[in-house]
Image: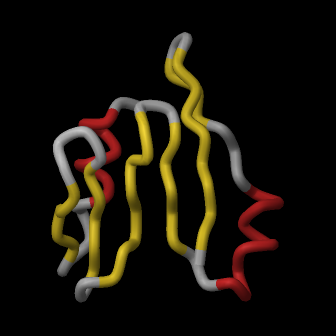
Amino acid sequence: MTREEVGRYAESPPRVKRKGTESRPAWYVDDRLVVRLHDSNTLVIRVPLSKREALLDEVVLVSSGAELLTVILTS
């Protein structure tokens, strides 16, 4: 998954605004962080603590050719 694909997907829901920097973009809803591209291989996603464990059981690392995207869940 490319950073452009992450951006398009992150900006698809209503009320999402892109902030951050060019090298470390982040997407917010009502000024609350939702997603941040930490580096070219790491995506940080904010989720409620109550849902984190269930999501960890379902997280699939996304592979795009030789690239691997690591997903970090945070509350």
Q: Which of 70 and 10 lies nearest the eye of the viewer?
A: 70
**Residue 11, image x and y in percent?**
22, 61
Q: Residue at x 22, y 58 (%)?
A: 20
Left or right: 31 in relation to 37: left
Left or right: 53 in relation to 71: right
Q: Quadrant of the C terminus?
A: bottom right
Q: Please, is residue 5 above or below residue 31 in the view?
A: above
**Residue 72, image x and y in percent?**
61, 55
**Residue 13, image x and y in percent?**
26, 71
Q: Which of 36 and 63 lies nearest the eye of the viewer?
A: 36
Give the colouring mode of the picture: secondary structure
Farthest-out residue, top: 66
Q: Quadrant of the N terminus?
A: top left
Q: Residue at x 55, y 11 (%)?
A: 66
Q: Residue at x 40, y 71 (%)?
A: 34
Q: Please, is residue 31 above or below residue 40 in the view?
A: below
**Residue 16, image x and y in percent?**
22, 73
Q: Across the whole image, how many numbered discs are drawn on residues?
A: 0
Q: Please, is residue 67 above or below residue 27 in the view?
A: above
Q: Residue at x 31, y 36 (%)?
A: 3
Left or right: 44 in relation to 28: right
